[in-house]
Amino acid sequence: MPEVEADRAYAAEGCEPQLCADDLRIAQFLDCEFDGVAGLAREFPLLIGAGNRDRRFVLEEEGRLVAHAAWRPLILRSGSERLLAAAIGLVTTRRTRRGLGYATRVVHHCLERAQEAGADLALLFAPPRNLYRRLGFVAAGRERLIRLEPGGAAAKLRRANAADAAELLRLLERHSLRVERTRADFETLLDVPGTHAYLREQDGRVRAYCVEGKGRDLRDVVHEWAGEPSEVECLLRALATELGRPLCVLSPESEPSPLEDPELLQSFALIRILRPQRFGGADPVEVFGDSRKPARVPIYVWGLDSV
Ligand SMILES: CC(C)(COP(=O)(O)OP(=O)(O)OC[C@H]1O[C@@H](n2cnc3c(N)ncnc32)[C@H](O)[C@@H]1OP(=O)(O)O)[C@@H](O)C(=O)NCCC(=O)NCCS
């Protein structure tokens, strides 16, 4: 693991992040500076859409945006418990201004606002790096990754769309670990480009569904599924066969797996605890576990909810 550099003064330290109500300005900045591929506003509608204007922060210099980060509240269900998480995303600094502390400043600001709003923890779905370590994030939470080879029996499945959201929500809500999601949010998420949802029906009712891909993320990865385990298994095997390629299937470690194929345990997010008194400690690995350590408080975020 690389050493975390000792604190030193950076240009961004005195800057105060501001809200930005101009949706188009944010979208254009991110499309230029995030990874150079346009379309982020359609891929992250709940994070940077107009409905989340109060939680999108920017830094400006001489009238130009130089950095951005946004957060949105997620209510995590952990059995009968409810926890408030702040999911932070689209952390971006203008290419010519990187390495000066701007991202650190704007993420720190999101953490402060989330803490004020009563969040119990903060989540980031990004690879670990010093930027986040210095802000107290560590890789934590537990998820299973199963590799499913094609070649199983074919079975009837159909593409799901926003019109199926109510039925899919009925199945999703049977998971004891999940994020609370409204039907309207589900409809919006199913419309994100690159999101492919499939379902199995019987007697006019949806018995199982799964979702693969989400915008530019999670390609070839099934990051959400629900339904009777035998129906989910049938759906996943049929999907791998129909697509003619292996599928990676993610799921929470503490729920029964729909598949028995070889699996790997991994951390599913970078986590920082914001209210240690809620958990009896500030160490996310102690509380939520990681690939080596079981969770004391299991949590899970299905892929569609990951900002
Ligand atoms: C990732 C990204 C947001 C970083 O922005 P940035 O403004 O350059 O970040 P910072 O200047 O705050 O931090 C850069 C480094 O300086 C370090 N640093 C910042 N302030 C520091 C300080 N006061 N003392 C010591 N080190 C410091 C950080 O820890 C970080 O280390 P790392 O690069 O090893 O992780 C930027 O490169 C970017 O926009 N990339 C494209 C989009 C992206 O990938 N976003 C992340 C996924 S959501």
Image (spheres, rainbow, N blue to C red):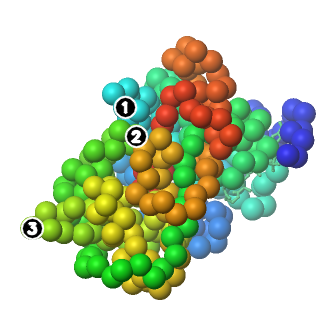
Q: Residue at x 33, y 69 (%)?
A: 234
User: Residue under circle 1?
Assistant: 79
- The amino acid type of the residue labelled 2 equals Leu
Which quarter of the figure has residue 23? bottom left
User: Residue under circle 3?
Assistant: 203
Q: Is ligand 1 closer than 8 angstroms to the Cβ of mark 3?
A: no
**Mark 1 to mark 3 CA distance (whole Å):** 30 Å
Q: Is residue 3 left or right of residue 95?
A: right
Local secondary structure at mark 2: strand
Q: Is residue 68 left or right of residue 193?
A: right
- The 10 Å Cα crowd at callout 2, few under 14, some 14 to 19, many 20 or more, is many
Q: Which of label 1 and label 3 is nearer to you?
A: 3
Picture coordinates of residue 132 (x, y %)?
Answer: 71, 41
Picture coordinates of residue 137 (x, y %)?
Answer: 68, 36
Tag shown at residue 177: 2
Picture coordinates of residue 5 (x, y %)?
Answer: 89, 39
Name the residue furthest left. 203
| Cβ–Cβ under 8 Å for marks 2 and 1 | yes
Picture coordinates of residue 219 (x, y %)?
Answer: 52, 71
Q: Residue at x 45, y 82 (%)?
A: 151
- The amino acid type of the residue labelled 3 equals Asp
Question: Does 276 sit above or below residue 149?
Answer: above
One can see residue 11 in this view:
yes
**Mark 2 to mark 1 CA distance (whole Å):** 6 Å
Which quarter of the figure has residue 159? bottom left
Q: Is residue 180 left or right of residue 221?
A: left
Earlier residue among tags 2 and 3: 2
- Depth check: 103 or 282 in front? 282
- The amino acid type of the residue labelled 1 equals Gly
